[in-house]
Image (tube, rainbow, N blue to C red):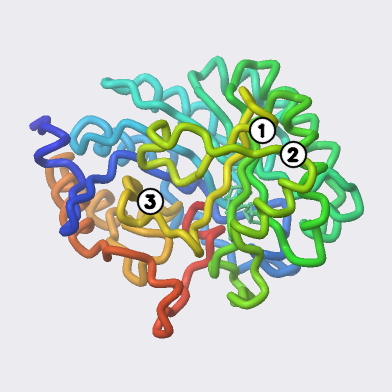
Amino acid sequence: MIQDGTRTGLADRYGRTATDLRVSLTDRCNLRCTYCMPEEGLDWLAKPELLTDDEVVRLVSVAVTHLGVHEIRFTGGEPLLRRGLVDIVRRTTDLAPRPEVSLTTNGIGLARQAVALKDAGLDRVNVSLDTVDQETFKKMTRRDRLQDVIAGLEAAHDAGLTPVKVNAVLMRGVNDSGAPQLLEFCLERGYELRFIEQMPLDAQHGWDRSTMITADEILGMLTERFHLTPDDASKRGSAPAESFLVDGGPQTVGIIASVTRPFCGDCDRVRLTADGQVRDCLFARTESDLRTALRAGADDAELADRWRRAMLNKLPGHGINDPSFLQPSRPMSAIGG
Ligand code: SAM
Ligand code: SF4
């Protein structure tokens, strides 16, 4: 039975309803960003644990047709490593009502796949790029692939996967001094840059509140080179980025202050891991298993019902700034950032 998404959608106990689903397609990655995972990588999920392409599409379809989800973002790990990506995107954009479909990627391999992804219906991409300095890139990602990312960005732009957004994380003494240069690079090419405060989601548990670069510091660094004025706040809605017009606009830069100015009260997100677990928050310490029910033959109504119930555990906030905060056991790359 198809239900009304607002009444029987993914509501939690605090008045929020999730309509934006982040789907992790793999926990594997071809980079090793220092704020995300260790040099040696992680114990990757075994193939039988991963949802198949059909299983991913089935769960996405339940979310869209039964639960009022209208935005799907594929992520990972590195989603471009998933062989069935183009087909998954095509089958997702074929759903009715058609959801907005986007991809968060490190951009490696995007030059090869951008046109096929666009043809499959992909609307937009977010490409992660923390620096445009080759040596710093190598140091931060432990791989010498800056040129591949730049080529991926260009291909996405040319294919019309716009607006191309760039996500950047700053680390003190590593890439922070290059923030204005990164903004210049994005402005020149028409990409929308957003800085994300580093969060305690790295596999090594190396995050330190006292050394992370705050949103206010980022603003300070950028205003040494650019004139920033707050963009119209009414455009923000539940979007996590605070947006600033650069030198009078129309181009903007965003700052996502997840740690210092949390936006949990407006959260409209829910996540599905590559092994079929629903997470109601990046920082959740519990997950709800949909894969077992799916493989046992549950129908759409039962899956939707399990998903709705999973949302009732969602806490009002992430609690990072609380002394009792505990980092979730899965890192960002396994949850789907
Ligand atoms: N591999 C893809 C990529 O890098 O875009 C998708 C997955 S990655 C986990 C998604 C986003 O999470 C990236 O923009 C990355 O910079 C960000 N990220 C990873 N670890 C983070 C952390 N500890 N704090 C803040 N952002 C983080
Ligand atoms: Fe890979 Fe993305 Fe994590 Fe970097 S941030 S290691 S690209 S999953």
Alpha carbons under labels 1 and 3: distance apart: 32 Å
Between 191 and 156, which is closer to the camera in this rendering?
191
| Mark 1 residue type | Val
Left or right of residue 105, residue 276 in this image:
left
Disc 1 is placed on an element classified as strand
Please rate how many residues cluster around mark 1, counting C-alpha atoms within 10 Å: few if below 14, some from 14 to 19, many from 20: many
| Mark 3 residue type | Arg
Alpha carbons under labels 3 and 2: distance apart: 36 Å
| Mark 2 residue type | Phe
Disc 3 is placed on an element classified as strand
Q: Residue at x 36, y 42 (%)?
A: 238
Disc 2: which residue: 226
Q: Is the residue marked 1 within 8 Å of ligand 1, measured from its CB? A: no
Disc 1: which residue: 246
Q: Is residue 279 visible?
A: no
Instruction: State yes or no: discs 2 and 1 in contact (Cβ < 8 Å).
Output: yes
For marks 3 and 2 on the same chain, the one whose residue lies earlier in the sequence:
2
Disc 2 is placed on an element classified as loop
Using the rendered view, name the quadrant where residue 13 is placed: bottom left
* Residue 219: % across, % down: 65, 51
Q: Residue at x 17, y 39 (%)?
A: 300
Disc 3: which residue: 271
Between 124 and 80, which is closer to the camera in this rendering?
124
In the picture shown, does residue 283 fall above or below 274? Answer: below
Q: Give the number of the mark in front: 1 or 3.
A: 1
Q: Quadrant of the N terminus?
A: top left
